[in-house]
Amino acid sequence: MSLFGIANRNQKTFRPKKNAPSGNKGAQLQRHINATLGSGNLREAVRLPPGEDINEWLAVNTVDFFNQVNILYGTLTEFCTPFHCPTMSAGPKYEYRWADGVKVKKPIEVSAPKYVEYLMDWIELQLDDESIFPQKLGTPFPPNFRDVVKTIFKRLFRVYAHIYHSHFQKIVSLKEEAHLNTCFKHFTLFLWEFRLIETAELAPLHDLIESIILSC
Ligand SMILES: [Zn+2]
């Protein structure tokens, strides 16, 4: 399956790609990520570049990971349906119910595609909020910035967990396995480097994560 084919098949379901925050600075950090990724050294790619601001680094990478998950999940939308995935699960032991603490306070059981839709809408809302993700360089980040980033990572992780547990065979047949594994490896090394997710949350993909951490 060519990239062109994937893009065509999912044209309607794609969300527009988000640009890096922090203006030119963000774009520059984005180039740094792309260059280090291109070299194949993922450990190096996640590290805070010397002299850079940690919050700007977290912001640019958060947008980047959001875009990646969006594209990956976008290739599965015709298979991840309410019929095939009536609940948002990650294997038989883990099931997620949706709540955002604002509009939905009491967790509700929804299908996986609905859950991912709520989740992506919620993340998009945070990324578009300039008081959380400033677009202009030098605008201060809010005191709770890291907490917002952690929640975004926790939720993006659930999409990966669902993909690995419920759609891995489909990923293999689409020949997207290597791409999925590279994206997840990058994501895992980043969250590990900055301690962005509680260990208990990672349980559904524990073995995979352990092998990534130990092999790098
Ligand atoms: Zn699914």
Image (cartoon, rainbow, N blue to C red):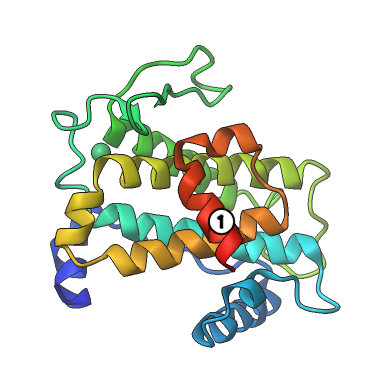
Q: In the rendered image, is residue 171 in sight?
A: yes
Q: Which residue is mark 1?
A: 188
Give residue 192's position: percent from left, percent from top.
66, 54
Residue in the foreground of this view, choosing between 75 and 186: 186
Residue at image position (57%, 44%) is 152
As drawn, 205 above or below 22: above
The residue located at (57%, 80%) in the rendering is: 41
Residue at 41%, 55% (x, y): give it: 69
Residue 121 in the image, given as x and y percentages of width and height: 43, 41
Classify 154 as above or below 52.
above
Residue 81 locus on image (x, y percent): 18, 36
Which residue is more in the foreground, 19 or 99?
99
Residue drawn at x 86%, y 78% as measured from the top left:
51
Ligand 1 lies under 8 Å from the Cβ of mark 1: no
Res. 63 in view? no
> Viewed as shown, does residue 173 lie left or right of 118?
left
Examine the image and state in which quarter residue 90 appears. top left
Residue at the top extreme, as displayed: 106
Give the image quarter of residue 141: bottom right
Give the position of the N terminus as an image quadrant: bottom left
Which of the two residues, 130 or 39, is positioned nearer the viewer here? 39
